[in-house]
Amino acid sequence: MRGIGSGLLGRAKKRVGDDLTTDPYLRYVLLLATVLAGFWFWHGIPEFATIDERWRLIDALAAIGTVVDDPGLGAIRPAILAQQPAGATLYVNLLAVLPVAIVALATGQLDAFVEFNPQLRTAGLWQFRTGTPEWIWTWSLLFARLLTVVLAVGCVYLTYRLGRAMRDRTTGRLAAVLLSLTWGFLIMAHEVSEDIPALFFLLLVLYLALRYIETGDRAVFLAGCIAGGIAIAFKLTAGTSVILLGLAYVLRARRPGVNPRDALLQPGLLVMAVACGAGAIVVGFPEVLAAGPEVLIERVSGGGSRSVGVAAPVAPSWWWLVRGYLNGLGIPLFVGALGGIAAAITRLRERSIEADATVLLLVGLGMYLLVYSRWGYVRLHHLLLTFPLLALLLAAALSRLRGHSQRIMWALVAVLFVTSSAYAGVGDLHYATTPRDEAGEWLNANAPDNATMEVYRSRFRDATFPRDMQISSYRKARMTAGSDPPTRVQWMNNLSTRCPEFIQLTYWDLVHLGTASPIRAESGSQNSATDGYRRGLPPRSPTPKRAEHVRSLLTGQYNYTVAAEFGPQPPMWPQPRTQTSLLDLLKTGVDPWTITYGDDQDFRTEQYTLILNRTGQCGSSRNTSPRRRAP
């Protein structure tokens, strides 16, 4: 088995080298993917882009800290069990954090990792964030994000290789460029998660499955089983690998010159395939190695459906799917993808390697749509695994069109490339101008050292937290209050005893204002309340007491004035509870930074930040609107 593995790795290395040498355009395609996937990949650092990114990275840091605190093999098992089950993602993030740990060891700061312990999930991150060196957070995130970018470029190359094996170089180039210009793919390349690694290994499964159909190489099939097991260890929805490999096993039997009986009756190969796949899954889940198969069984049994998110509209699954594809692809590429599917269906009766590849792609796409149709809430990152499949189907259709009319083919390619470049480019450029990062830069430049800022959103992804400022939050107050902590509203109304110099309000704080937002009143929208009722928005704040406190701040009753504002002013409410019109759907395919209902990353509107600065004594009531002070 070791000889087979080294042989396949050697062939893969040679294949990459040959492709770069013989195809003069490939290096430019990969450069495009690198630029788009890597553009401003450090956004928000040292803060986290998503909740998953936070815990995935902290799990790796905590695993190292547990071993540092208790060196020896006996510490490995508790280090694994203390983390949230995330499968093979732990291995990738440990690899990303390894350079930081080596530097910490060389500089005598390895003990800082001990602070990252299992209690982080219950005790909170505040004391660890302020008590550990900022460079550990910063460089750990940088390396983890950079590794994600590298894997994303690898996904583009595998898409190229699939297209080339499926039909020709043109198909490979078109598919690789289309994936590079897919906004949903670029979003996931800008965060640390299991999605991009899972996609990489799923594409590897597809390529090896196609190669097995063509060559019948048993080593290639077994390598595909191992890759499939790894993909499943990253993301359970990559379980389609099993179906695709089984389908490839059957499709091999209908290849010209192949004896169907000999191709189908290979019990030894099937036994080895199951062993390789199962072994990769077990090794890929460190929790299974530490605690047994119960952990995996629990994850599988709990991963078959999704409920509607707290901030999400109640809508049928088809609405979520269409909305996700429109936002992830943009309208032109979405229409092109539908055309690619329609064109692919007409080729299924053929007996060719292209037809076999088309069967694999359509079955894979159909399996995902079938699974997602049972969910009540489909996020954009759930659709990531299908984006390369759509790119390949569309690229193959365009390549076939060249044989009928090159002029029409290149005209369609030009339209898709130009529109998708504009759509993805606008989305990418916004990473350099995110309102929350701009708010952090403003505070670093204008707030005095050790100034106190009060926040009402204590998750790191919901607000900006400059490290040189003292942060006042309800979470910190609860942690220090002992056995009788105040309620959130009690703590908020006790502002005059804290008297912070700055207060930060965010998109999610203004949500509580409902239709009575003074910020919206200033914007000059006379019909905003009427429009709100027409669109099904709530007539009153969901939490009136919190709304009253926020309104008091904005009307100047606590002697705070607006010092700075970042991002477009949000609507009165983040989203309606039922909104399924065609116009609402089409908007998501025009603006790449559409509000995402708590999806992967907060985009421009959700990043809205308002900084209030104290201009007088706390608590003296006055009913005047806050004056804007030039920064």
Image (cartoon, helix red, strand yellow):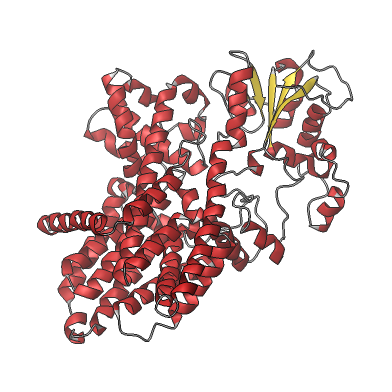
Q: Position of residue 202 (x, y in %)?
A: 35, 60
Where, quadrant-wise, is the N terminus in this rendering?
Answer: bottom left
Q: Position of residue 321 (x, y in %)?
A: 57, 64
Query: What residue appears at the point 66 percent right and 62 percent down from the top-left corner?
Result: 585
Query: What residue appears at the point 53 percent right and 64 percent down from the top-left corner?
Result: 415
Query: What residue appears at the point 63 percent right and 42 percent down from the top-left corner?
Result: 604
Where, quadrant-wise, is the C terminus in this rendering?
Answer: top right
In the picture provided, is 559 more to the left or to the right than 326?
right
Q: Is residue 627 visible?
A: yes
**Front position in the image: 208 or 574:** 208
In the picture provided, is 192 more to the left or to the right than 372?
left
Q: Position of residue 267 (x, y in %)?
A: 17, 76
Give the mark count: 0
Q: Is residue 296 visible?
A: no
| Figure quadrant of residue 476 | top right
Query: What residue appears at the point 46 percent right and 32 percent down from the top-left corner?
Result: 120
Q: Is residue 552 above or below residue 289?
A: above
| Figure quadrant of residue 452 | top right
Q: Residue furthest left?
A: 3
**Front position in the image: 478 or 456:** 456
Q: Position of residue 55 (x, y in %)?
A: 45, 39
Q: Is residue 92 above or below residue 104?
A: below
Q: Is residue 189 above or below residue 199?
A: above
**Front position in the image: 51 or 387:** 387
